[in-house]
Image (tube, rainbow, N blue to C red):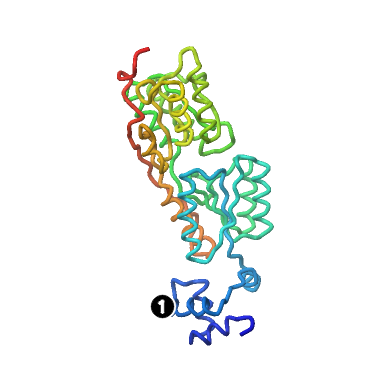
Amino acid sequence: MGKVTIIDVARLAGVSTATVSRAMHAPHVVLPSTLERVQQVMQECGYVYNATAGDFSRRKSTVVGVLILSSTNKVATSLGAAQSVATMLHFPFLLSSSGFDPKLEREHLQQFLQRGVAGVLVIGHLQENRPILDKLAQRGIPCLYLWDVLPGSNCNYVGFDNVQGSFAMVNYLIGLGHERIGFICAFNTGVERIAKRYDGYKKALALNNLPLDETIVRSTTSSYDKGKKAMKDLMALPDPPRCICCASDVIAMGAMAAVCEAGYSVPYDYTVVGFDNSEFAAYTCPPLTTVDVPGEEMGRLGMQSLMQLINGEAHGLIQRELPTSLIVRGSSCPADRLNKW
């Protein structure tokens, strides 16, 4: 047999070409037994669907652009859940990671425009490039934001309140008697959701009538090395803060490494807490106190919502807020249990 066509697959499977098409594009509407038969014939014949030609003939893209800043453990959880939904609906990913580089992010967004993607899932972006995302939406390419809530905007989102999540953590630490709390957060990198975590920190201090001491605040992007360096900077102060709140688990793990390397212990020399509840947070030594964010649920619901926008099934904006929760583990302790120096 020469080049196998959709007509050949339909004849060998004993179904119509429309059924074969549905098996590829909307498998959820095909009877399981029929779907299995069609897929088996396609495999045996070596039939490969030409997605590019299909998109051209339908004048509709089936590629989803996904924009991230970096692939941390928790972001990867959202990506995996989103991709599972997209794969089931035969929508491939065009994944772009900017690494916090605004120029690179603009190039990626321009590629989305040039390729005419069906929609864009925004898991992380720099604030200065929001106008380009708005341009995508103006051209009829739906965008949906994850990992943040944007009330009062014309943006679609499935996320959580970063201010409240950070506020809850800092307020918990104040409740343990800590009054001088250091903070490590990439608040000046142009990432709105991270800046909101700094806002939550300041809000908790103000509510408890504690002063904001900017000498014990460090801004850095989320990496183990940079978290470690920021913690070393804080520990080198004449009067270092004994309690450190980090805006990500990755930063917190770097901070804990700095404490250990200096011959001190967590939590009794330095209390260290994180944000995200990444998979490794329960396995650090000691286990990390952190803010749990619904990474998998965001990815799944976010992609399902984006598909509704792409298919014209959404009525109005999609704006959904998911809850966060505080996970207390061994890296935090009351202030009166800190070792006396």
In screen coordinates, is 82 left or right of 173? Answer: right
- From the top left corner, tell me how far across and down residue 137 is, in percent: 60, 54
265 or 192: which is nearer to us? Answer: 265
- Please identify the quarter of the rendering in which residue 115 is found: bottom right
In screen coordinates, is 124 left or right of 261? Answer: right
106 or 69: which is nearer to us? Answer: 69
Q: Residue at x 37, y 32 (%)?
A: 285
* Element assignment for label 1: loop
Q: Residue at x 40, y 79 (%)?
A: 33
In screen coordinates, is 222 left or right of 210? Answer: right
Please, what is the three-letter code of the amino acid marked with disc 1? Leu
- From the top left corner, tell me how far across and down residue 21 is, in percent: 53, 77
Vertical placement of residue 93 versus 189, above or below: below
Q: Residue at x 49, y 50 (%)?
A: 157
Q: Quadrant of the C terminus?
A: top left
Q: Which residue is mark 1?
A: 31
Vertical placement of residue 11 versus 138, above or below: below
Vertical placement of residue 323 versus 164, above or below: below
